Image: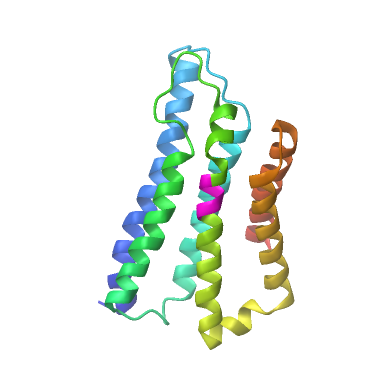
Amino acid sequence: MSDFEFIFALFGLLLGLSLAEVLAGLARAIEAKLIQGAAVKIGWLTPLLAAFVLLDLLSFWQAAWINRDIVEISGRTLMAVMIFAGAYYLAASLVFPKSIGERTDFDDHFFRVRRIVLGVMLVLLVCQLGWYLSVPALAGLLSRPLALGLTIVLVLLMIAAMVVRGPRWSRVAMLALVARYVVVYLI
């Protein structure tokens, strides 16, 4: 078993749970709306936040694979992986409300949790970038114009989604965040 395979077992478990948490929240929302017939207002904001979190998780999962030859087993590495992937789980678990009542409004939930979810993910992005800059082989890749530009756009859109007011501008910011990942995956 390689160092990466050993570390990735923990990492994959925690990130897999994060993906499952978001998908389970979506399933609860669909069940409440369609099956139970509750007067639930799902709206666009929480599903867009869920899509962004899922895409960001996939992006980080892909980044881990790309960096597999650099990872070495150590206590620091295990702690970093657990904290990092655990923070993703925290963010993912907040995307959808845990209990869905007769009059749950998912847009209201979005406005309660967006700064926490996006803030955690922004901190994780900064940590990831800091690690990349500390590894010479990765620092060079990050300084490429396309990578730098896409990263700056991501940071600015995340900040915008955290601070804009009202549902219209929040939808625009969240749509832009999701679209940015879709474009990156298609490049």
Q: Is residue 118 magenta?
A: yes
- The quarter of the displayed image where residue 122 is located: bottom right
In percent of width and height, residue 63 lies at: 50, 68
Give the residue furthest to the bottom.
Answer: 136
Kindly identify the residue that appears in the image at 63 percent across and 77 percent down. 142
How did the renderer colour the structure?
rainbow
Kindly identify the residue that appears in the image at 34 percent across and 55 percent down. 14
Above or below 38: residue 106: below
Quadrant position of the C terminus in the picture: bottom right
Give the residue furthest to the left.
Answer: 1
Above or below 101: residue 124: below
In this image, 89 relative to 112: left or right?
left
Q: Nearer the viewer, residue 172 or 166?
A: 166
Above or below 36: residue 80: below
Kindly identify the residue that appears in the image at 53 percent across and 18 percent down. 40
In percent of width and height, residue 121 lies at: 52, 55
Residues rendered magenta in the picture: 116-120
